[in-house]
Image (spheres, rainbow, N blue to C red):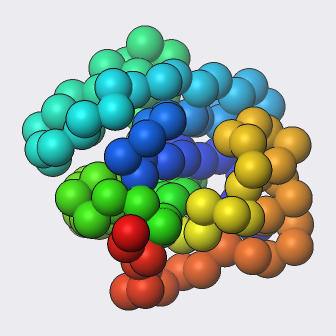
């Protein structure tokens, strides 16, 4: 079961990251022109540090698989895989239409209904 997680929703518009830990959930809006891994990584590092979270194998990463911008989705998946290698987190993906609004209740429904994919090889680009 997914309890604590980092969620990355970067599809080229309304880019957001969120984190759930200790029954708390925080979301941060990012600029819409995330065109490099460094920028997304920097935003994630600042975000987790701000909330005093250390990503470890007790966390999962949930990534928006699209549809959306090719660059934004590939960057999101690449950053998630890098964090997986460094921290041992598990990665899951969801499709944009499965999550009408990025909030904790909607994410819990995705998890409960087992709608997350653990294979990130089918992104949807526009």
Whether residue 86 is visible to the viewer of this picture, yes or no, is no
Q: Residue furthest top?
A: 50
Residue 30 in which image quadrant: top left
Q: Residue at x 43, y 13 (%)?
A: 50
Residue 114 to residue 51: above or below: below
Q: Identify whether 82 is placed above or below 94.
A: above
Q: Is residue 20 visible?
A: yes
Count numbered badges in the picture: 0
In the image: residue 88, left or right of residue 16: left
At 78% across and 39% down in the image, what residue appears? 104
Residue pictured at 87% horizontal, 66% vertical:
112
> Quick check: 28 above or below 106?
above
Quarter of the rendering occupied by the N terminus: bottom right
Residue sitting at x 41%, y 60%: 68
Quadrant in the picture for the C terminus: bottom left
Left or right: where 70 falls relative to 66: left
């Amino acid at each position: 079961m997914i309890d604590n997680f980092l969620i990355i929703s970067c599809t080229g518009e309304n880019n957001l990251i969120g984190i759930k830990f200790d029954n708390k959930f925080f979301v941060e809006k990012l600029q819409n022109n995330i065109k490099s891994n460094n920028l997304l990584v920097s935003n994630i590092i600042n975000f987790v540090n701000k909330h005093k979270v250390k990503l470890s194998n007790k966390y999962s990463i949930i990534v928006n698989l699209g549809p959306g911008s090719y660059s934004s989705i590939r960057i999101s998946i690449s950053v998630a895989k890098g964090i997986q290698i460094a921290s041992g987190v598990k990665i899951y993906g969801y499709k944009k239409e499965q999550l009408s609004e990025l909030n904790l209740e909607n994410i819990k429904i995705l998890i409960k209904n087992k709608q997350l994919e653990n294979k990130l090889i089918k992104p949807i680009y526009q």
